Amino acid sequence: MAVALVLFASAAARAGEAQEGYLLVRQWCTSCHIVAPNQDGSDAAPPFESIANDPNFTEDGIRAWLSDPHPPMPNLNLNRVEIDRIVAYLQSLRN
């Protein structure tokens, strides 16, 4: 029973982090990316759903990219917690 509660709490925490990540990407990324599957937007950069499901984009790779992006992506000066939340959101988009 205790293990089930820990797993439930962990899943709930990840869902909360993903929601916070969604709020961040909605604020910072929608001018270039489609950040949600049901959203219209710019196709100047890959949709987040494509990034989430691309096996070449690992969690560590995404963290590294967000820490030190290359043009044309601007450096948003995200902190580690913000990056972790964005990664959690991307994970929530995986099929």
Image (tube, rainbow, N blue to C red):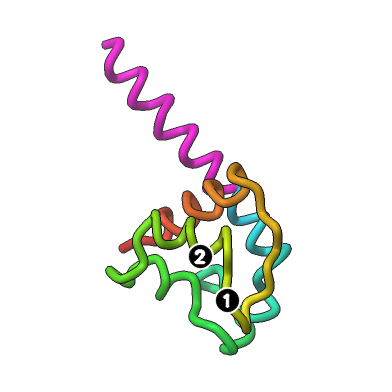
Which of the labelled discs sits on residue 65, or is there none? 2
- Residue 86 x/y as whole percent: 55, 54
Secondary structure mainly formed by the magenta segment: helix
Q: Residues within 10 Å of mark 2 (few under 14, many from 20)?
A: some
For marks 2 and 1 on the same chain, the one whose residue lies earlier in the sequence = 2
Question: Residue tagged by mark 1?
Answer: 70
- Give the quadrant of the N terminus: top left
- Residue 84 x/y as whole percent: 52, 47
Indicate the secondary structure of the residue bearing disc 1.
loop
Identify the magenta region.
Answer: 1-19
Which of the labelled discs sits on residue 94, or is there none? none
- Residue drawn at (33%, 26%), measured in percent from left and top? 7
Is residue 13 a member of the stretch shown in magenta? Answer: yes
Indicate the secondary structure of the residue bearing disc 2.
helix
Is residue 87 a member of the stretch shown in magenta? Answer: no
Query: Do callouts 2 and 1 mark residues in contact (Cβ within 8 Å)?
Result: yes
